[in-house]
Image (cartoon, coloured by chain):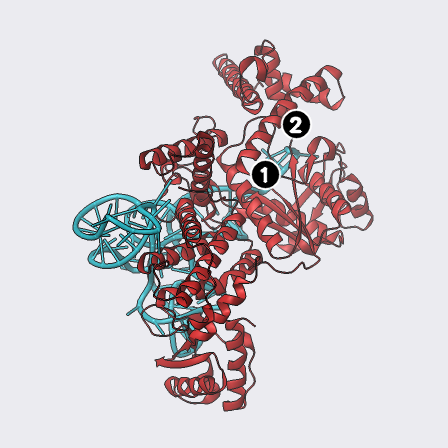
Chain colours: A red, B cyan
RNA sequence: GGUCUCGUAGCUCAGCUGGAUAGAGCAGCUGACUUCUAAUCAGCAGGUCACAGGUUCGAGUCCUGUCGGGAUCACCA
């Protein structure tokens, strides 16, 4: 049993024995003891003073005595006000370390038989991925890795918004101004090329609007916008010419996206295309009408009244019988369930759609969908720049590809300055720089709680000092370096029963790992892993600095420290893997 | 206007179901490389946890209100 669980269970016994009162394990608040006090774990005794009807120090004294007398691993205690600080025996720590060292996959939970589908990224096909998508992708990826670690069967999907007026705008501009330009002829990545025409379109529309305004016709629609609408109609009518162009340009975009995803290190099990799913959902509306969950207005439009759930009246089908966004999402949810029969379904989507998902989930619940209870919107805040919001009109949108190139470039420059890896082949160096740069970027983004709007300062994102991805990578590299130098050892680490503060700190931290994974999953929050990894890394760096592992006084001590080092390294790598970060060979 | 959400050090962020003197990093200042990699470590300085009430033995954390930022409330997606 784990140490914290064990102490909690014994606390239940202690309270039962001393005060004839039954409590639950969860009533026991157990923390790691703060640095400035002696001890390893601290029990907060205030909650038991009422039961015992005694002052806090007296209760702590009685509980402390009971634990020392009855629990082998509790070696001693001290009391400060209402806090009972317990000291754990050195022999137990050694046993604990040996035990987790034997678990290659320490922190993983057994398969729980539950299936979860996680949707993330979900881009439009009219422009390349930007900073906001990076946050989305990293959160989605990390969440999916955490779920796997926690024993879920995970399927990663994205829905690609490949149809609609925005695509037609890019297509139209390309047709008008492109002169047959292709990714090959221009040397541009496909998504960027299509994005270029989206910008051209917008410029043209703006120009036409201004001309109309100057002519006193500001209420008139720009001619190019009318053309785009016509193109959408043709698309819907399966016009061969429009469809061919659409297929071709989408193909460019997809291959561009794939390249970006690969660099980011994310992948998907299945892609849904809006062009296939946009007509879904109408059956559900029929069903809902029959069940009187929806109602029809005189003009033929269909609505749902959600006012009793503190939401509004929402349209689910237009008066002309066509779908709206909500209709589609109802349909895709059903399709997804028929594809996967999942227990949980997570949508990683920005917080501007909070309301939409509340409504969607409420509707699915009312439709009586069996999976409705397992739906979750992993909502995250917008990414802003130090100067404020990104605005495509002002050209301040940070492009995903550019950003990745930039962080790797900076990692390279820093590395060259240090010269630590200059003896390696060019190829190996490139890989090291890539890992370091990407670690800086990823860590910088994931460390912030998803819900919060975050300020992204490009200068800080390539920071490799202090709380950063490279900081943690560096610890791992040190671990590997020490282990390599140590070679084989056969001394009995269990003989080492007088761990130093720095060592106990690490053991307490290691003990927490599986709980952190659980909490991360429960709260849908990868930032918990990021912060944990940093703390563990920091504790290790201090240990490494203060204690020379290879020059330990005797074989047993050295064995203990090497095992500790190994387990810390393994745990750090595991945590980094949950964040999508790889450890470089050297740095 | 209704609803949701955020407000913690100069800046960027932590703070687990309420628990000890609110913590990190960056920026600033000061020390530590002949040592298992200094992309590191140690120290100094930096706070009315937006504000006001309330619940509690105890509130940054829970409740109410106020102020400030953001989002959203389309027969757009």
Residue at the location (54% across, 56% down)? Answer: A520
Q: Is residue A509 above or below residue A191?
A: below
Q: Is residue A111 above or below residue A51?
A: above
How far across and down, in percent of the image, does residue A100 sit?
A: 53, 64
SS for dot 2: loop
Q: CA distance from mark 1 to mark 2?
A: 18 Å
Q: Which residue occupies the foreground of this view, A218 or B4? A: B4
Choose top left, top right, bottom left or bottom right for residue A522. Answer: bottom right
- The chain carrying label 2 is A
Mark 2 packing: few (<14 Cα in 10 Å), some, or many (20+)? Answer: many
Q: In this rendering, does residue A223 appear at all?
A: no
How far across and down, in percent of the image, does residue A235 sit?
A: 72, 21
Q: Is residue B34 above or below residue A279?
A: below
For the residues carrying marks 1 and 2, which lies nearer the camera in this image?
1
Residue at the location (45% across, 63% down)? Answer: A509
How far across and down, in percent of the image, does residue A475 sit?
A: 40, 51
Residue at mark 1 = A121
Residue at mark 2 = A164
Choose top left, top right, bottom left or bottom right for residue A532. Answer: bottom left
Left or right of B38, for residue A440? right
Q: Is residue A210 above or below residue A256?
A: above
Going from N to C along the chain, the mark reached first, 1 or 2, is 1
SS for dot 1: loop
Left or right of B69, for residue A224? right
């Amino acid at each position: 049993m784990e140490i914290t669980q064990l102490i909690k269970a014994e606390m239940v016994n202690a309270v039962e024995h001393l005060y004839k009162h039954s409590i639950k394990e969860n009533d026991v608040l157990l923390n790691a003891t703060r640095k400035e006090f002696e001890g390893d774990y601290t029990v907060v005794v205030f909650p038991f003073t009422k039961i015992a009807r005694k002052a806090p120090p007296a209760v702590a004294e009685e509980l402390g005595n009971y634990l020392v007398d009855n629990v082998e691993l509790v070696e001693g205690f001290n009391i400060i006000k209402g806090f009972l600080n317990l000291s754990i025996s050195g022999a137990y720590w050694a046993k604990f370390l040996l035990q987790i060292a034997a678990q290659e996959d320490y922190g993983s939970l057994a398969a729980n038989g539950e299936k979860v589908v996680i949707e993330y990224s979900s881009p439009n096909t009219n422009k390349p991925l930007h900073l906001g998508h990076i946050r989305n992708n990293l959160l989605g990826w990390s969440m999916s890795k955490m779920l796997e670690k926690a024993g879920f069967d995970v399927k990663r999907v994205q829905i690609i918004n490949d149809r609609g007026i925005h695509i037609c705008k890019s297509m139209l501009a390309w047709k008008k101004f492109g002169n047959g330009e292709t990714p090959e002829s221009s040397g541009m990545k496909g998504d960027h090329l299509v994005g270029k025409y989206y910008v051209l379109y917008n410029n043209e529309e703006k120009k036409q609007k201004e001309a109309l305004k100057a002519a006193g016709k500001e209420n008139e629609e720009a001619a190019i916008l009318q053309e785009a609408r016509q193109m959408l109609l043709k698309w819907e009518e399966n016009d061969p010419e429009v469809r061919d162009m659409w297929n071709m340009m989408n193909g460019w975009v997809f291959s561009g996206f794939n390249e970006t995803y690969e660099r980011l290190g994310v992948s998907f099990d299945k892609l849904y295309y809006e062009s296939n799913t946009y007509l879904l959902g109408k059956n559900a509306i029929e069903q809902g009408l029959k069940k009187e969950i929806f109602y029809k207005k005189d003009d033929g439009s269909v609505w749902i009244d959600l006012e009793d759930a503190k939401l509004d009246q929402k349209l689910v089908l237009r008066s002309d019988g066509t779908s709206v966004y909500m209709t589609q999402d109802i349909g895709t949810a059903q399709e997804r369930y028929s594809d996967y029969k999942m227990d949980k379904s997570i949508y990683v989507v920005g917080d501007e759609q909070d309301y939409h998902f509340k409504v969607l989930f409420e509707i699915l619940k009312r439709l009586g969908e069996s999976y409705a209870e397992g739906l979750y919107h992993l909502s995250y805040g917008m990414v802003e720049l130090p100067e404020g919001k990104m605005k495509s009109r002002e050209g301040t949108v940070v492009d995903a590809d550019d950003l990745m190139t930039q962080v790797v470039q900076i990692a390279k420059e820093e590395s060259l300055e240090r010269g630590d890896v200059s003896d390696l082949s060019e190829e190996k160096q490139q890989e090291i720089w890539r890992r370091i740069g990407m670690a800086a970027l990823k860590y910088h983004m994931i460390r912030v709680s998803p819900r919060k709007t975050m300020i992204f300062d490009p200068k800080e994102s390539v920071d490799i000092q202090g709380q950063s991805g490279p900081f943690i990578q560096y610890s791992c590299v040190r671990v590997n370096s020490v282990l390599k130098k140590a070679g084989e050892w056969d001394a009995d680490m269990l003989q080492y029963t007088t761990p130093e503060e720095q060592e106990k700190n690490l053991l307490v931290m290691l003990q927490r790992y599986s709980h952190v994974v659980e909490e991360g999953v429960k709260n849908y929050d990868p930032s918990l892993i990021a912060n944990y990894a940093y703390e563990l890394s920091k504790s290790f760096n201090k240990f490494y600095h203060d204690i020379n592992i290879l020059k330990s006084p005797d074989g047993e001590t050295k064995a203990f420290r090497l095992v500790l080092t190994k387990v810390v390294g393994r745990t750090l790598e595991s945590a980094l893997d949950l964040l999508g970060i790889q450890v470089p060979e050297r740095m």
